[in-house]
């Protein structure tokens, strides 16, 4: 099936898929470690990276990459922002940012599906929907940790403007990339 981004469903070898997943996990890890000091948690490049991975890889490969990233963190690898300083593994994931991590997986699925099946102009709105999922799950989880009346101040207001810029940048980079690059990332051939 031809995608509206000009890509066919990936028919990569297992080795090709594993290399792409490992590369995506590495990119997500680096994006978590590049931090702008902020309160209550540092601001990272994770949202931009996950949107680009989801859009470039599509639903199956993107979701597998995000699941691999979350599994790596769950088993104790220091892949998340603030690890290992603020804990590792499931203990970290069950902390205040755990809902945002779950939202990452949902956002990846939303954006990956859009990249595979919808017109390319739907990519930014799909990223916006993915961001909404991140915040919905993140805030729902954070509510059990935040003092009354502080939920939005702790988990939304300081970050939303930056995240909107990040998803816009991710959409521009993915959509502006040459078709040959997109095909190489997915392991597909150019359809003429």
Image: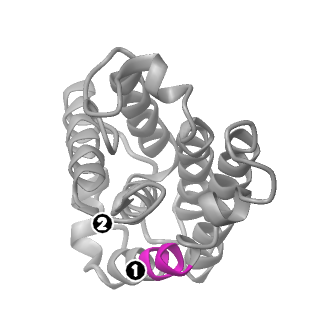
Q: Is residue 98 left or right of residue 67?
A: right
80, 50: nearer the viewer = 80
Which disc, if any, is residue 125? none
* Residue 162 falls inside the magenta stretch: yes
The C terminus sits in image quarter:
bottom left
Q: Main secondary structure of the magenta part?
A: helix
40, 7: nearer the viewer = 40
* Residue 50 falls inside the magenta stretch: no
Q: Is residue 136 left or right of residue 44?
A: right
Query: Which percent across, then down, holds residue 126?
Result: 63, 68
Marks 1 and 2, how far apart at CA: 9 Å
Mark 1 closeness class: few <14, some 14–19, many ≥20 residues within 10 Å: some
The N terminus sits in image quarter:
bottom right
| SS category of the residue bearing label 2 | helix
In this view, the mark in front (1 or 2): 1
Q: Residue at x 53, y 50 (%)?
A: 108
Query: Which percent across, then down, holds residue 91?
Result: 47, 19
Toward the top, the furthest residue is 75
The magenta region covers: 161-167
Q: Is residue 12 left or right of residue 117?
A: left
Query: Which percent across, then down, holds residue 185?
Result: 25, 56
Q: Relative to residue 86, is residue 10 depicted above or below?
A: below
Which disc, if any, is residue 182? 2
Q: Relative to residue 70, is residue 174 depicted above or below?
A: below
Query: Which percent across, then down, holds residue 41?
Result: 44, 54
Q: Is residue 24 left or right of residue 105?
A: left
- The residue where tag 1 is placed is 175
Q: Residue at x 47, y 18 (%)?
A: 90
Q: Earlier in the sequence, mark 1 or mark 2?
A: 1
């Amino acid at each position: 099936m031809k995608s509206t981004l000009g890509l066919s469903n990936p028919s990569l070898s297992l080795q090709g898929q594993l290399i792409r997943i490992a590369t995506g996990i590495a990119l997500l890890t680096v994006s978590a470690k590049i931090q702008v000091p902020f309160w209550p948690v540092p601001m990272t490049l994770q949202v931009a990276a996950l949107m680009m991975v989801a859009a470039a890889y599509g639903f199956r490969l993107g979701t597998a990459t995000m699941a691999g990233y979350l599994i790596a963190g769950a088993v104790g690898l220091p892949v998340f922002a603030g690890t290992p300083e603020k804990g590792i593994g499931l203990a970290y994931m069950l902390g205040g940012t755990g809902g945002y991590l779950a939202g990452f997986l949902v956002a990846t699925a939303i954006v990956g599906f859009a990249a595979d099946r919808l017109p390319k102009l739907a990519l930014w709105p799909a990223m916006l929907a993915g961001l909404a999922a991140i915040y919905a799950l993140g805030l729902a989880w954070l509510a059990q940790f935040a003092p009354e009346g502080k939920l939005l101040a702790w988990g939304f207001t300081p970050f939303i403007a930056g995240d909107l810029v990040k998803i816009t940048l991710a959409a521009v980079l993915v959509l502006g990339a040459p078709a040959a690059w997109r095909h190489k990332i997915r392991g597909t051939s150019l359809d003429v």
